[in-house]
Image: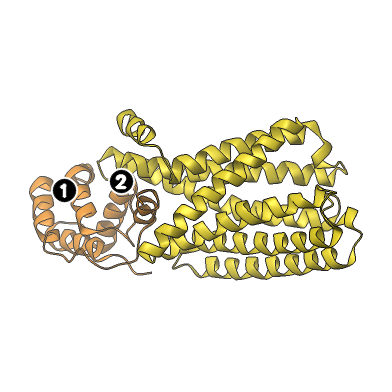
Chain colours: A yellow, B orange
Amino acid sequence: MLALAGIATLAFILAGTSVGIRLLRLAKRTQGKAERNVGLGLLLICGLAYPLSLSLQVDAIPETVRRFAFAIAMFSLAGGAIAITEFVRGVFRSEVPWARWLTVASCAAWFAMTGWGIWAAVSQPIESIGSTEGLRFILRQLLMLGVFGWTAVEAGLYWLKMRRRRAIGLAEPEVINRFALWCISGTMSVVSSSVMTVTGLAGINPSQDPTTLLVTGLGGLVSSAALVLAFLPPKSYLAWIRASF
Amino acid sequence: MPDAEAFNFVCDHLEQSSELDRLAARGTVRIALKQAGLEARTVAPDQMMVVADKILPKELDSRGIDGSESLCADIKRGLSSLDTAGGAETPDAVFKRLGGG
């Protein structure tokens, strides 16, 4: 199980970082806010927050460096989550007041979580900084659940609309599929965060629980594949999608 | 967010050229749009033309409106004169761009 979790984490880091860089390059060319937000979000979460938070578990790294890395990881996670939230709001609910307020509330919650995480990195014993028990971990997982839950719901609803449009020739197969893949990626993150939250609430360490490792490992692999197929699709995959509609 | 120009155009045309009153005309077009997976706020003239071609005639027939085919042909001619530019960027336009770099 540990090997699966390790492979899945590595796959998620590589996939998210590659896709994030590709979308930021696209944003530089198009000046589009959507590609900038989602690219930045993926790069901060997958390329910085995940690898930096893993460094906490490497005893060979000096303690001061690990504390600093954890603080940067919390900052990156919050920045990434806010960027993804703004992507969802800007793309799907740009004219809706409640979505603006939800985004503002999400920003405030993430700033608070970052402050809490940095406080822990500075003042808590090194063993308890990245603890998967306690309120700080649960709240962080719930916030992640909220961000990716909203992502999955909006993409899923739009995917249903796009399928109806396809019936009268008003939607391209690869674009319909991209909504489905983005929904799948968000759903896998929701599943992982939910399992981690439940495990944490039950007082079990998620990193030592086989079921949690299996679910989050498989979720990470599926999410990575969905990200790559959505935003870095091989030509053969696009041809297959076009042929299958 | 106000309804799109294409939506208002079709509703106004139906109200003036058929027995449907304003509420019924707008309701009929909204039902046709929902079947097509489109929204009154964001529908573009070219999308509305496809709806007027493939869905709206059946909706008008089901409401007992005579000459639905010719009514929709008039609507399509009118829609072709509307400006297709402008309006907020739709999610499908964004997702098309995200995969096309």
What numbered label is drawn on residue A59? none
Q: Residue at x 69, y 46 (%)?
A: A193
Please rate how many residues cluster around mark 2, counting C-alpha atoms within 10 Å: few if below 14, some from 14 to 19, many from 20: many
Q: Who comes first in sequence, dot 1 or dot 2?
A: 2
What numbered label is drawn on residue B36? 2
Q: Residue at x 25, y 61 (%)?
A: B7
Q: Quadrant of the C terminus of chain A?
A: top left
> Foreground: A33 or B70?
A33
- In percent of width and height, residue A164 lies at 34, 41
> Foreground: A98 or A169?
A169
Question: Which chain is mark 1 on?
Answer: B
- In percent of width and height, residue A62 lies at 84, 57
What numbered label is drawn on residue B65? 1
Mark 2 lies on a secondary structure that is: helix
Question: Against A203, is A221 above or below?
Answer: above
Q: Is residue A15 left or right of residue A137?
A: left
Question: Which chain is mark 2 on?
Answer: B
Mark 1 lies on a secondary structure that is: loop
Mark 2: amino acid: Ala
Question: Against A36, is A190 above or below?
Answer: above
